[in-house]
Image (tube, coloured by chain):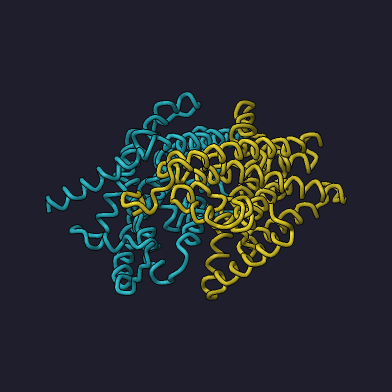
């Protein structure tokens, strides 16, 4: 057991080192993300001007929500490289590794995150006051529950990721079309871009029942105190258990069907 | 540059190839078309719903926002029409060593770039809804649709597309010097511009607005030209998009040529034993 964890650790370390890339151009990506955050903060300030709470959220809470969403963007839309590995054929060599497949992909994902957490998330927290945003949680308890909720969000996100990977095996279709559709829809359905309570006509209430809301909306609302923490956590736990059960079963059915072309 | 008949012949060939690829099966066709549409529909719907909740955004009415979003989608559609298959995401082709495949062809590289990515069927999924959105907005009668307006609209759309593609080539050229590190720079630049163009930049402060109308030219993909076309800014503002297109096109051509010269000395690692994609 200990040796498996050692192997996961080695995989994560390698992935973290790869994060630096060839010559630090990764910083360019972070600057682009920062620019987007600044624009979204401006958007909320403009929309909330002269208003009190909207959908039960005050401006300060929405600003914190937005900054947090950007800081933990990778975690609230957790993705392994399973789909790409299936597409380009490298999943074959993954299957030969002496570690469980899911664990291997998760370790790699964790390693990639380590680099981003240090080079983007942490600085964004430190410099948030310069953007006029408070990053303090609603209460110490909310901060603690956020950590649990974020872990559940990652569990839901990775389960969906493995389900998407299985989907590629079954439909034998373009990886990119599926990925684009998924990225475009999840950012909205999960509440990562716009807090669900701000949608009109009760749409946010409907969306909050979907698994995507467990990925972003739940942890972010818990952090800013915009929703009941226990119901949100219960919903996340329920989705995590169900989706992991489904992901494991679907993957086991998909594996014998898999054909990789590579190249 | 090739003669018009040669250009049309190549576009015809790539249209057939686009059809063959997408119509390989009904499932494939639906996946591509629906996938492309869904990728954009989420953000567009979110902005419109937000406008509904807050009675507009940054002084833009829902109808005007519909035009802005349709305009931005149309720019993406034109980009897909002419520069699909990673032609716009040029850093991928350079980083992966696939540029060699284009350099080997017995025709100018520029001709390859404006024909090889021609994908009219893919583009339909974006161009059609974009057209409907703009037409729906204009039908409300906010501006008079005259021949001059339509001419300005078409010219602006082409200029905005030049800005988008030029920006991709400008940053994508970095892959000549850093094939692995910069391989995903063009898509990253595109994603950023795509994610910023859906908002009317009136909501941003002067500094941010200046930045998004210069170094990061997201404003030229929808906000600035839409403002001018809808009469929200002076008609002279329309020329700003054309100037931006000329500047970005010039800068990207310069950067790409510099990179290509460098590439002539270093080549690609794609087919070597230590190539990073092996």
Of B159 and B110, the residue lying toward us = B110
How many numbered discs?
0
Give me the residue at 35% from left, 48% from top. A230
Extreme residue toward the left, this view: A2
Give me the residue at 12% from left, 51% from top. A3
Question: Image quadrant for the C terminus of chain B?
Answer: bottom left
Q: Colour of chain B?
A: yellow
Give me the residue at 64% from left, 66% from top. B15
Of B213 and A207, the residue lying toward us = B213
Residue A195 at least partly seen: no
Q: Quadrant of residue B23?
A: bottom right
Measured as percent of width and height from the top left, residue A246 is found at 33, 66
Measured as percent of width and height from the top left, residue B39 is found at 54, 56
Residue B10 at least partly seen: yes
Of A178 and A261, the residue lying toward us = A261
Q: Is residue B237 above or below residue A201?
A: above
Extreme residue toward the top, this view: A130
Query: Which chain is displayed in cyan in the rendered image?
Result: A
Give me the residue at 53% from left, 48% from top. B90
Of B124 and B17, the residue lying toward us = B17
**B88 horizontally vs A218: left or right:** right
**B158 horizontally vs A39: left or right:** right
Q: Is residue A47 above or below residue B107?
A: above
Q: Is residue B72 above or below residue A240?
A: above
Measured as percent of width and height from the top left, residue B176 is found at 47, 41
Measured as percent of width and height from the top left, residue A221 is found at 43, 43
**B192 horizontally vs B136: left or right:** left
Q: Quadrant of residue A83?
A: bottom left
């Amino acid at each position: 057991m200990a040796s498996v964890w050692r192997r996961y650790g080695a995989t994560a370390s390698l992935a973290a080192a790869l994060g630096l890339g060839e010559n630090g151009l990764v910083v360019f990506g972070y600057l682009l993300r920062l620019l987007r955050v600044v624009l979204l903060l401006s958007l909320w300030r403009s929309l909330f001007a002269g208003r009190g709470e909207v959908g039960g959220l005050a401006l300060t809470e929405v600003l914190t929500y937005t900054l947090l969403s950007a800081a933990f963007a990778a975690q609230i839309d957790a993705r392994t490289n399973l789909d790409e590995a299936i597409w380009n054929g490298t999943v074959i060599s993954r299957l030969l590794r002496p570690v469980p497949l899911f664990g291997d992909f998760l370790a790699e994902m964790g390693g990639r995150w380590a680099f981003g957490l240090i080079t983007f998330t942490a600085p964004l927290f430190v410099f948030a006051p310069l953007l006029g945003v408070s990053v303090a949680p609603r209460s110490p308890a909310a901060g603690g529950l956020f950590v649990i909720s974020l872990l559940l969000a990652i569990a839901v996100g990775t389960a969906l990721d493995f389900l998407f990977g299985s989907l590629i095996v079954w439909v034998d279709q373009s990886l990119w079309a599926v990925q684009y559709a998924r990225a475009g829809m999840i950012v909205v359905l999960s509440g990562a871009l716009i807090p669900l309570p701000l949608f009109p006509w009760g749409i946010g209430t409907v969306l909050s029942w979907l698994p995507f809301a467990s990925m972003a909306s739940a942890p972010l609302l818990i952090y800013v105190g915009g929703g009941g923490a226990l119901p949100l956590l219960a919903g996340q736990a329920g989705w995590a258990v169900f989706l992991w059960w489904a992901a494991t079963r679907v993957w086991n059915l998909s594996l014998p069907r898999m054909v990789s072309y590579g190249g | 540059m090739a003669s018009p008949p040669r250009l049309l012949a190549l576009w015809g060939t790539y249209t057939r190839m686009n059809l063959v690829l997408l119509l390989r099966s009904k499932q494939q066709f639906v996946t591509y078309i629906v996938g492309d549409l869904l990728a954009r529909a989420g953000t567009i719907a979110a902005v419109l719903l937000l406008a509904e909740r807050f009675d507009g955004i940054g002084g833009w009415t829902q109808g005007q926002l519909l035009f802005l979003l349709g305009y931005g989608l149309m720019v993406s559609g034109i980009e897909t029409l002419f520069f699909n298959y990673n032609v716009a995401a040029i850093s991928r082709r350079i980083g992966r060593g696939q540029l060699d495949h284009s350099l080997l062809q017995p025709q100018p590289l520029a001709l390859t770039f404006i024909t090889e990515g021609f994908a009219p069927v893919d583009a339909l999924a974006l161009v059609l809804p974009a057209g409907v959105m703009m037409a729906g907005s204009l039908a409300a009668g906010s501006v008079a649709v005259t021949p001059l307006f339509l001419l300005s609209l078409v010219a602006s759309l082409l200029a905005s597309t030049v800005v988008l593609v030029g920006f991709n080539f400008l940053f994508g050229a970095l892959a000549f010097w850093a094939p692995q590190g910069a391989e995903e720079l063009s898509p990253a630049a595109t994603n950023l511009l795509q994610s910023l163009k859906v908002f009317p930049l009136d909501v941003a402060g002067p500094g941010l607005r200046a930045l998004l109308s210069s170094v990061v030219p997201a404003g030229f993909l929808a906000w600035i030209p839409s403002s001018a076309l809808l009469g929200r800014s002076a008609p002279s503002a329309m020329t700003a998009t054309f100037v931006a297109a000329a500047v970005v096109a010039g800068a990207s051509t310069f950067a790409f040529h510099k990179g290509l010269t460098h590439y002539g000395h270093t080549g690609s690692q794609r087919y070597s034993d230590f190539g990073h994609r092996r």
